[in-house]
Image: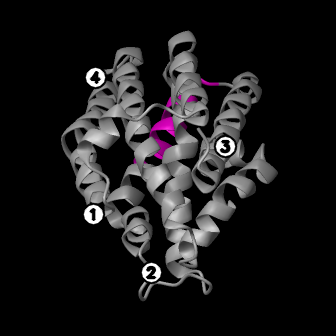
């Protein structure tokens, strides 16, 4: 029987996972009642996050022990640096945020805590540890996008955040999340054991809690 690692990790922190994927920031966004100032603050911090997220995927390539895993990591890295970052800048421009404002913004404490935790986990552990720290972001956003796109309470018509929801509900991002899940399952089958599950659960749970803090930062415009 194939071991579904990510499902097991989610099952190890059900309350935290629900608090993250159903955070008030997400709910207000779906219902078109999130203050624009909160969303703009989130977008600015998300730009800074993407920079460190790219570093983490570069680290994933370094931590890989096979060419296949190196290619998988660099494909994500290439997409982030040459596609996602440019799209984010243009998206922010549509919200009245100039590229210069993105560049000079200081990282909020929640952003610092989250991104440095991911990088430190990757530096001190192996590829599977790093992916366990990265997974809540990729898998969580995919789950949030898919849920919101179908939820009865979600407002799509006239919702200024509709494109955000559709991005993460879209085939491209859903495919990325599925590829990360599949890679983690494979790595666990190759080099994991039941003895590793508690440590991986701790990493995944901490990253999930830091994701909650990121939403909270956006909602309350915290620095």
Q: Residue at x 61, y 71 (%)?
A: 28
CA–CA distance between discs 2 and 3?
A: 24 Å
Spatial separation of the CA atoms under disc 3 and disc 4: 35 Å
Going 48% across and 50% down the picture, which residue do you hit? Answer: 41
- Disc 4 vs disc 2: Cβ atoms closer than 8 Å? no
User: Mark on residue 42?
Assistant: none
Between the residue at mark 1 and the residue at mark 2, the CA separation in whole angstroms equals 15 Å
Instruction: Let me know if residue 125 is in the magenta part.
Output: no
Q: Mark 1, mark 3: which one is toward the viewer?
A: 1
Q: Position of residue 147 (x, y in %)?
A: 57, 71
Q: Which residues fall within the magenta stretch? A: 179-192
Residue beneath label 4, please? Answer: 67
Q: Is residue 2 visible?
A: no
The front one of 219 and 172 is 219
Q: Earlier in the sequence, mark 4 or mark 2?
A: 4
Disc 1 marks which residue? Answer: 94
Q: Outermost residue toward the left? A: 82
Front position among marks 3 and 4: 3
Q: Are marks 1 and 2 in contact (CB under 8 Å)?
A: no
Q: Mark 2 highlights which residue?
A: 159
To which quarter of the image does residue 24 belong? bottom right
Gap between marks 4 and 2 measured at Cα: 43 Å
Q: Are marks 1 and 3 in contact (CB under 8 Å)?
A: no
Kindly identify which residue carries mark 3.
213
Mark 3 Cα shell of 10 Å, populated few (<14), some (14-19), many (≥20) = many
Q: Secondary structure at mark 4?
A: helix
């Amino acid at each position: 029987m194939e071991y579904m690692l990510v499902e097991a990790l989610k099952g190890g922190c059900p309350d935290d996972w629900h608090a993250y994927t159903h955070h008030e920031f997400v709910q207000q966004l779906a219902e078109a009642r999130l203050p624009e100032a909160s969303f703009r603050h989130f977008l600015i911090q998300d730009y800074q996050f993407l920079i460190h997220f790219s570093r983490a995927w570069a680290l994933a390539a370094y931590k890989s022990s096979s060419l296949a895993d190196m290619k998988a990591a660099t494909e994500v890295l290439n997409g982030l640096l040459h596609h996602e970052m440019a799209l984010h800048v243009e998206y922010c421009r549509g919200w009245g945020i100039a590229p210069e404002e993105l560049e000079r913004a200081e990282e909020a404490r929640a952003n610092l805590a989250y991104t440095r935790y991911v990088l430190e986990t990757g530096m001190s552990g192996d590829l599977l540890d790093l992916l366990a720290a990265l997974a809540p972001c990729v898998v969580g956003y995919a789950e949030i996008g898919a849920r919101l796109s179908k939820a009865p309470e979600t407002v799509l018509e006239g919702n200024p955040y509709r494109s955000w929801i559709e991005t993460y509900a879209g085939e491209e991002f859903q495919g990325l999340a599925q590829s990360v899940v599949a890679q983690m399952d494979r790595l666990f089958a190759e080099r994991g054991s039941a003895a590793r599950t508690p440590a991986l659960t701790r990493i995944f749970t901490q990253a999930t809690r830091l994701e909650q803090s990121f939403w909270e930062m956006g909602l309350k415009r915290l620095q």
